[in-house]
Image (cartoon, helix red, strand yellow):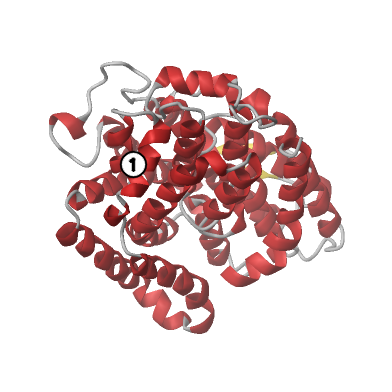
Amino acid sequence: MLQTLIAAENQETAAGAAVHFLQSSHHLPPVWLVAPFTLLLLMIATGPLLYAHFWEHHYHKVSIGLGSIVAAYYWFMVEQGASMLLRSLEEYLSFLALITALFVVSGGILINIERRGNPFMNGALLFAGALFSNLIGTTGASMLLIRPYIRINEGRIRAFHIVFFIFIVSNTGGALTPIGDPPLFLGFLKGVPFFWVMPKLWLPWILTIAGLILIFMVLDSRVGKGEMRVSEQSGRVSIIGAKSFMFFAIVIGAVFLDPAVIPGFPTLQTLLHLPFGIREMVLFAVAFMAYKTADKDAMRGNSFNFLPIREVAFLFIGIFVTMIPALEIISAYASGHARGFSVTRFYWMTGALSGVLDNAPTYMSFLAGASGKFGMDINSVSDMQKFAGGVNSTVQGDATSDIYLMAISLASVFFGSLTYIGNAPNFMVKTIAIQANVAVPGFIEYIYKYSIPVLIPFFALLWWLFFTG
């Protein structure tokens, strides 16, 4: 999606490339081509509520059909369209391989907590989930903990229990390491030091996590004990299928099988022109082996099935394709206007778009624009190391480059919790909760009842504390 801009950057500075890109605006897709993406989002939002029967049986056809419209345009009408579609397919397969491996591995691990859910117990579990998100990713932590979280609250669980789980475990929790969330990992591959993230984001992280847990505990205290089948009160935690943790270690190791991390590492995309690499083969193999060797009691206890990952796979193939023109337009705009953008604009625009687009390419688009503002190349590892270290702006009173990177990093991860499609585990948690007969808010209700009144004030506070000085 950034190929045109990246090619120009190899010959010019990033800022010069942005100007050249905009001058060649006829290469940008027509605005009407964003319509399939917009329609897909609207149908995801309204389908389960207004035409549930149709949506349940045909959502995959809708997603593929709308994606096919955009794919046909790029294939037949754009000179480099085929390579752009191939790149999008590569990104989708990388995304699908990782979440499939984490989903299957976590399904073979059954965590039994012999205690009734209460505000303090739930708050502690959410905080633990936030910590785990930085070790095994937001998808891994979400899939590992959502089922025991639902079980201990059986009979008293409400919609807000699921929403706050998504807020904390599936999104904001994973902001302290590149393993935690895909945008941060992409930044690491581009040259941002692995341990840059934690010292920069730990304070906003702890303020947000603590604040969200406090609000959650106040809401949870009003629920009461409820009718629950959990009888033992020993507080003992037992794990069935602990051998599957070995697969988590393999998944984490496989994530780093990339030429950007291991110089000279072979890529099947280059050698054999395949839309996947060795990393994706390893991850799909891990998913297969984890499923075949999983503890059957753990699988039954988790009511494991492939419906959540199937729904994500079909919907996100449509999202990945239909958002290509939207990302092209956004990338061109961000790069072309970067010199006039303040930290505030980068923060809010990165965040708002991460809530409705895939946050990884959104992060890359605005990172390219911000690095171009400082005369640096996003494809140069040394430039990105300097960018992360802090370079003074030529504009008097402007922030240093590391503050721009901090704003883009924080926004891309935190704002992913604004909608169900902001991050893949959001949708998976929602589907698992529905399968467990837990009431969850619809797409629109999630936004107006929870995202806007709960999250936006936190995000505004973070902006005021860290990006207005």
Residue 161 visible somewhere in the drawing: yes
* Residue 204 percent location from the top left of the image: 72, 36
* Residue 169 percent location from the top left of the image: 63, 45
In percent of the image, x 31 and y 16: which residue is there? 263
Along the line of sight, which residue is nearer the eye, 50 or 27?
A: 27
Q: Tell me where residue 265 sits by quadrant.
A: top left
170 lies above or below 436: above
386 lies above or below 223: above
- Say whether residue 19 is left or right of residue 355: left
Q: Tell me where residue 340 sits by quadrant.
A: top right
22 lies above or below 314: above
In percent of the image, x 34 and y 55: which residue is there? 324
Residue wearing tag 1: 20
Along the line of sight, which residue is nearer the eye, 110 or 334?
A: 334
285 lies above or below 424: above
> How many marks do you count on the picture?
1
Identify the element where label 1 is drawn. Answer: helix
How packed mark 1 is, by other alpha carbons closer than 10 Å (few <14, some 14-19, many 20 or more), is some
In percent of the image, x 74 and y 36: which residue is there? 466
Name the residue type under label 1: His
Outermost residue, left direction? 272
- Say whether residue 218 is left or right of residue 337: right
* Residue 285 percent location from the top left of the image: 29, 37
- Say whether residue 245 is left or right of residue 117: left
Along the line of sight, which residue is nearer the eye, 143 or 114?
A: 143
In percent of the image, x 38 and y 22: which residue is there? 380
* Residue 330 percent location from the top left of the image: 44, 52
Along the line of sight, which residue is nearer the eye, 233 or 371?
A: 371
Residue 439 visible somewhere in the drawing: no
On-image quarter of the C terminus: top right
